Amino acid sequence: RALELHLRAAHDAEQFEVHYQPWVDLRSGTVKGFEALLRWTHPERGPVSPAEFIPIAETIGLIVPLGEWVLRRACADAARWPDTVDIAINLSPLQFRSGDIVGTVKSVLADSGIDPARLELEITETVLLEDSPTNLATLHALRALGVRIAMDDFGTGYSSIGYLRRFPFDKIKIDRSFVSELPNDIDCLTITRGITELAAGLGMSTIAEGVETIEQQEILRAIGCTLGQGYLFGRAMPAAMSETLAHSRR
Ligand code: G
Ligand code: G
Ligand code: MN
Ligand code: NA
């Protein structure tokens, strides 16, 4: 397919960029970190969503080198933020399983010079779907490097509460589909509160995704969710802008 051919050539053509979406402390509004989000500008089509091209990159095996490039780029950019500001990076399940992800993360950390405690790796439940000893060993080995593991899009797909028992995540990202219905949808409110309490009881933190209104911020704060990410606080932005924002004390 044409898109596939363009995707293969995109890296050499320097069409990829990593943008950064801030996440904040819901009480103070202080920026605590950024999530790295890959961007591709297609020469004719313009911006293509990662939701469209990442599955293709996975199919053609490009996700492993591309994912490593994102790790390097994002950690290098994070090195220019204050050391109180963390960096979260999405790992594709394929990237997680193939090759030496632990060695890659270790070498990226060493090259960038950032404190491992500032790096958070976001994985989806599909990583754990087969719940193999190898996957669990990889998660533990990554954590042993000093990085944190976050479960992304929690509550969607096949994610199961049992995973939280089998593996000690550091953070749970409450999916936007629940947050966006706050505060009016009582079911979403109950689910969001339930996830927050469950996480707290298990010693994990929670972050609400897709926060768009002050009302949502306040209700999340009231139910004990400490962190938030969403258009209310900022969209994904180029590295230079993230650097300015990271250094502005608020
Ligand atoms: O906000 P955005 O449209 O950029 O994100 C769409 C989806 O693409 C999200 O699910 C996000 O996790 C995923 N995504 C964005 N950047 C990366 C990346 O560098 N690696 C992987 N594996 N997924 C990414
Ligand atoms: O799946 P993941 O959570 O990694 O990707 C984040 C996705 O959510 C990106 O596509 C990003 O652009 C999008 N996003 C981030 N904040 C908001 C928000 O406040 N509202 C909406 N509608 N989308 C958001
Ligand atoms: Mn994510
Ligand atoms: Na998510």
Image (cartoon, rainbow, N blue to C red):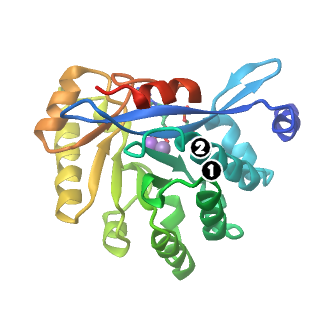
Quadrant of residue 94 within the rendered picture: bottom right
State whether residue 1 is above or below residue 109.
above
Query: Which disc, if any, is residue 71?
Result: 1
Q: Amino acid at mark 2?
A: Ala
- Count up the numbered dots: 2
Q: Amino acid at mark 1?
A: Leu
Where residue 140 sits: x, y (%)? Answer: 47, 75
Where residue 45 sits: x, y (%)? Answer: 77, 19
**Disc 1 Cβ-to-ligand 1 distance below 8 Å:** no
Q: Which residue is mark 2?
A: 74
User: Contact, CB < 8 Å: mark 2 with mark 1?
Assistant: yes
Q: CA distance from mark 2 to mark 1?
A: 5 Å
160, 166: nearer the viewer: 166
21, 62: nearer the viewer: 21
Residue occupying image coordinates x 63% and y 30%: 49
Note whether residue 186 is visible: no
Query: Which disc, if any, is residue 22?
Result: none
